[in-house]
Image (tube, rainbow, N blue to C red):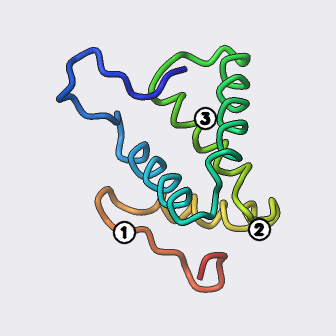
Amino acid sequence: MKPASRADGPLAPAFDAPWQAQIYAMFQVLIESGVIKVDIWAAPLGASIIRRQSASADDTVEEYFLAVGDALMSVLPVETTEISETMDPWRSAYEATPHGKPVLLLRGHAGD
């Protein structure tokens, strides 16, 4: 897998979908703010890419950013149970949100 290399020219968008830009921005902010150290980031990203390639994932920009997301989940200083408790309400909220509207979590759910 390789990061966004655009066959359609240097002025083409670097991302195929908005979520890819968002995940890229998240890891950039986490690195720049010192939450994630660059030397700690490289190994989980490489391992995530290798895992996806081993699972016969296509070599696409989407797969690369899915690997970035997997790596982020592995290095963030958050407990796995905390992520699990947050993920289901968040998924329900974004799936119920019309395109272009902000995602809102209901009171009483993780992330409030």
Compute the Cα span from label 3 to label 1. Answer: 25 Å
Compute the Cα span from label 3 to label 2. Answer: 21 Å
- Tell me if mark 3 has few (under 14), some (14-19) or many (20+) residues whose alpha carbon lies within 10 angstroms of its own: many
Say whether marks 3 and 1 touch (CB < 8 Å).
Answer: no
From the viewer's perspective, is 72 left or right of 20? right
**Residue under circle 3?**
67
Residue positioned 73% across, 30% down in the render: 47
> Quadrant location of the C terminus?
bottom right
Amino acid type assigned to the residue bearing label 1 in the image: Pro
* Element at label 3: helix
Is the residue 108 above or below the residue 25 in the image?
Answer: below
Q: Nearer the viewer, residue 30 or 109?
A: 30
Say whether marks 2 and 1 touch (CB < 8 Å).
Answer: no
**Of the numbered discs in the image, which one, if any, rests on residue 82?**
2
* Element at label 2: helix
Closer to the chain start, of discs 3 and 2, is 3
Amino acid type assigned to the residue bearing label 3 in the image: Ala
Residue positioned 29% across, 59% down in the render: 100
**Which tag is nearer the camera, tag 2 or tag 1?**
2
Q: How many marks?
A: 3
Is the residue 42 above or below the residue 1 in the image?
Answer: below
Q: Nearer the viewer, residue 86 or 9?
A: 9
